């Protein structure tokens, strides 16, 4: 972190002295540690997913539902040793996995915490939950440390990534990242109880007027492999949007969502996860609350 190149922005900031493009320095800031039940079914089978939400983010998404922590950094500092302890407490609570939400910009410290937790007896899989904006070099550090990858593929071209998330190369970097993870991790594997133990899931959030270019996204994934479980999300909520694009100021329509689902079925994906149209009212976290997602218990 002294000449930081962890994310594709490659800002080169000495984060011991200032903040990087991710808005944070070298100290780990955590927004919440929760038992979370709002992820895809194989990730929450049993008691739920042990989610650790990190503050800061390399992206500048104009509709981020986690902006309390990604942008405004509402969280607490935590050492790698305390982070390891939090992982062990989540396992003790019966969680299926340790779900690290947006950990990239803390990679060296988080990997140290994982190593410590393993030494102390952590046995459940590590899940890297990412925006998809990753460099191969950073992902190589995660190899062998994370067993499950939950990757966003937000946009099907670079132009809309620039408009909505403030980076010029989202589509290029996310495709490279997902290809690398697929080649090194492979298809999602489940145990006899239906719990994910390793592999890749890719998410795509459908935006109004198909602004995210969803057909490009799912066609790329189909060419990579139809074995990749595809999670197509309907939960876009315009209340979080802070830009000037008129289409982004409304919810998606059932027809917009259905046409993306149908395209995925037509292409032949083996596994598709879908949400109902009430999803925008169900996923509105408040990280100041003891239960940020209503049904989840905050442990930290």
Image (cartoon, rainbow, N blue to C red):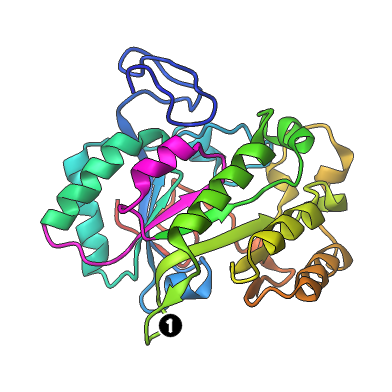
Residue 107: image x %, image y %?
Answer: 35, 38
- 226 or 65, which lies in front? 226
Q: Quarter of the image containing the N terminus?
A: top left
- Residue 137: image location, x then y, percent: 43, 36
As drawn, is 136 to the left or to the right of 152? Answer: left
Q: Residue at x 58, y 33 (%)?
A: 59
Does residue 167 lie above or below 177 as drawn? above
Q: Is residue 234 above or below residue 108?
A: below
- Quarter of the image where one finds residue 228: bottom right
Asked if residue 4 can be seen in this view, the reply is yes
Q: Where is residue 142 drawn, in percent x and y?
A: 36, 46
Stretch of the chain drawn in magenta: 120-147
Q: Image point 66% across, 38% down: which residue? A: 172
Residue situated furthest bottom in the rendering: 192
Q: Nearer the viewer, residue 232 or 93?
A: 232
Q: With respect to residue 191, does 58 lie above or below?
A: above
Q: Is residue 138 magenta?
A: yes
Q: Is residue 55 visible?
A: no
Q: Categorize mark 1 by other alpha carbons within 10 Å: few (<14), some (14-19), many (20+).
A: some
**The residue tagged with tag 1: helix, strand or loop?**
loop
* Residue depicted at x 51% and y 66%: 38
In the picture provided, is 148 more to the left or to the right than 280? left
Does the magenta segment cover residue 152?
no
- Give whichever of 238, 202 is nearer the camera: 202
Q: Which residue is mark 1?
A: 194
């Amino acid at each position: 972190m002294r000449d930081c190149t962890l994310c594709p922005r490659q800002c080169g900031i000495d984060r011991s002295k200032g903040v990087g493009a991710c808005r944070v320095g070298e100290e780990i800031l955590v927004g919440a540690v929760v038992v979370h039940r709002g992820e895809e079914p194989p990730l929450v089978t049993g008691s739920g997913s042990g989610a650790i939400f990190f503050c800061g983010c390399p992206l500048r998404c104009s509709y981020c539902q986690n902006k309390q922590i990604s942008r405004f950094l509402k969280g607490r500092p935590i050492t790698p040793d305390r982070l390891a302890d939090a992982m062990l407490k989540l396992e003790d609570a019966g969680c299926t996995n340790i779900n690290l939400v947006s950990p990239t910009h803390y990679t060296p410290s988080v990997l140290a915490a994982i190593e410590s937790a393993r030494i102390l007896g952590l046995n459940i899989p590590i899940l890297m939950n990412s925006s998809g904006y990753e460099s191969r070099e950073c992902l190589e550090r995660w190899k062998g440390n994370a067993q499950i990858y939950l990757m966003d593929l937000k946009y099907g071209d670079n132009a809309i990534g620039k408009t909505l998330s403030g980076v010029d190369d989202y589509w290029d970097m996310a495709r490279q990242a997902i290809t690398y993870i697929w080649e090194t991790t492979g298809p999602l594997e489940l145990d006899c109880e239906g719990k994910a133990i390793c592999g890749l899931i890719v998410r795509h959030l459908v935006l109004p007027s198909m602004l995210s270019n969803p057909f490009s996204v799912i066609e790329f994934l189909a060419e990579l492999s139809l074995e990749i479980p595809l999670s197509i999300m309907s939960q876009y909520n315009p209340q979080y949007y802070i830009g000037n694009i008129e289409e982004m100021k409304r919810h998606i329509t059932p027809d917009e969502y259905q046409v993306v689902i149908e395209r995925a079925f037509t292409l032949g994906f083996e596994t598709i996860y879908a949400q109902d149209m009430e999803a925008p009212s169900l996923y509105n976290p408040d990280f100041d609350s003891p239960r940020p997602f209503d049904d989840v218990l905050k442990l930290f």
